[in-house]
Amino acid sequence: ELATAKEAAATAESALAAEKAELAAAKEAAAASVAELATANEAAATAESALAAERASAADATAQLMAELASAKAELAMAEKAASDIAAGLALAKEATATAEFALAAEEASAADVKAALEIELAWVNAELATAKEAV
């Protein structure tokens, strides 16, 4: 009986040793899993940080582009205003030119009338002079 009990005890010890070995392997596997999880968490945190930086950079770039767009729109509005002012000035210049051309034409017509009147008077004076010369 004692031998059987010893044999049973040896079998139990052997089984216990096998269980301890399995437990140690399981602990090792769990530790490896915890390490992998920590590495994955660190990678996820790094990725989130990079994503946040990218988002901030994109927001800055968007804000800068919006500011540039607003500036370009303001410059375009000023250029359109300047073009409108130039067109208005050109219209006024054309109107002034037309008025000046009309006034010049009127002056030329008046000068032609005066010249014709003077030529008629000169012809009359010459005729009177000729008559006076004949009388002398």
Image: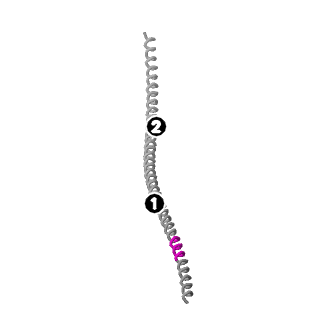
Circle 2 — which element?
helix
In the picture, measured across the screen, residue 84 lies left or right of residue 22, that is: left
Q: Residue 5: say if magenta.
A: no
Q: Are marks 1 and 2 in contact (CB under 8 Å)?
A: no
Report the front residue among 123 and 15: 15
The amino acid type, in three-letter code, at marker 1 is: Ser
- Quadrant assignment for the C terminus: top left
Give the amino acid at mark 2: Ala
Q: Residues within 10 Å of mark 1 (few under 14, many from 20)?
A: few
Dominant SS type (magenta): helix
> Start and end of the magenta stretch?
20-29
Is the N terminus in the top left, top right, bottom left or bottom right quadrant? Answer: bottom right
In the drawing, what numbered circle is on residue 49?
1
Q: Earlier in the sequence, mark 1 or mark 2?
A: 1
Q: Which mark is residue 39?
A: none
- Marks 1, 2: nearer the viewer: 1
Q: Secondary structure at mark 1?
A: helix
Pointer 2: what residue? 98
Q: In percent of the image, x 56 and y 84: which residue is there?
A: 7
* Scheme by which the image is coloured: one colour
Q: Position of residue 81 (x, y in %)?
A: 43, 46
